[in-house]
């Protein structure tokens, strides 16, 4: 039997690494993935976005450079399956133009639509902007 798949964005993945509000919900998703009860997927952009958040936190002094590197290495060990497809960027651009939201965020949504699964985000602004017309987007911890 095929496991259910969920797309996760960087707002969720970062919570696996850093103490933030909603972390317990993000860690539960990660546990389900590690227990092979669900599949977590994301566009390959996820790795870059996670790295950028860690860089910002190190630059602000919240993390040492060494801690940021260790966090990133830990992320790579348990990262979701990173996927891309030729039509994903075009679909993300279409979503961004239709909804007035950045292509970066819409890339995750495009993957969820392509794979016919839900997107889990902790980005409340993104969730509020998309939920009416695209019910496949879910807010972390709101289930």
Image (spheres, rainbow, N blue to C red):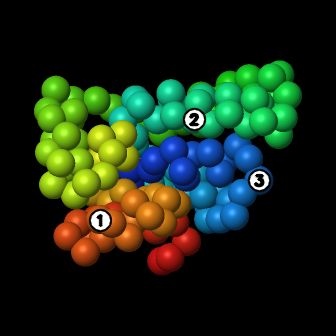
Alpha carbon distance from label 1 to label 3:
27 Å
Looking at the image, which residue is at 57% across and 46% down?
Answer: 13
Residue 56: percent from the left, percent from the top? 68, 33
Label 2: few (<14), some (14–19) or many (≥20) C-alpha neighbours in 10 Å: many
Quarter of the figure with the N terminus: bottom left
Q: Nearer the viewer, mark 1 or mark 3?
A: 1
Q: Nearer the viewer, mark 2 or mark 1?
A: 1
Residue 30: percent from the left, percent from the top? 59, 51
Tell me the element at label 2: helix
Looking at the image, which residue is at 44% across and 64% down?
Answer: 125
- Earlier in the chain: of badge 2 and badge 1, it is 2
Looking at the image, which residue is at 41% across and 31% down?
Answer: 45
Residue of label 1: 130
Looking at the image, is 47 positioned above or below residue 108? above
Looking at the image, which residue is at 31% across and 52% down?
Answer: 101
Number of labels in the image equals: 3
Residue of label 3: 19
Q: Is residue 83 left or right of residue 46?
A: left
């Amino acid at each position: 039997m095929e496991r259910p798949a969920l797309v996760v964005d960087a707002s969720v993945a970062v919570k696996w690494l850093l103490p933030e509000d909603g972390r317990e919900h993000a860690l539960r998703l990660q546990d389900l993935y590690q227990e092979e009860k669900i599949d977590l997927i994301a566009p390959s952009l996820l790795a870059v976005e996670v790295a950028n958040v860690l860089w910002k936190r190190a630059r602000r002094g919240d993390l040492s450079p060494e801690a940021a590197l260790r966090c990133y290495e830990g992320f790579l060990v348990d990262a979701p399956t990173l996927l891309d497809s030729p039509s994903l960027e075009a679909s993300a651009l279409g979503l961004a133009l239709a909804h007035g939201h950045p292509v970066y965020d819409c890339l995750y949504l495009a993957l969820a639509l392509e794979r016919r699964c839900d997107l889990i985000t902790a980005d409340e602004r993104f969730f509020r902007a998309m939920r009416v017309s695209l019910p496949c987007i879910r807010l972390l911890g709101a289930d």
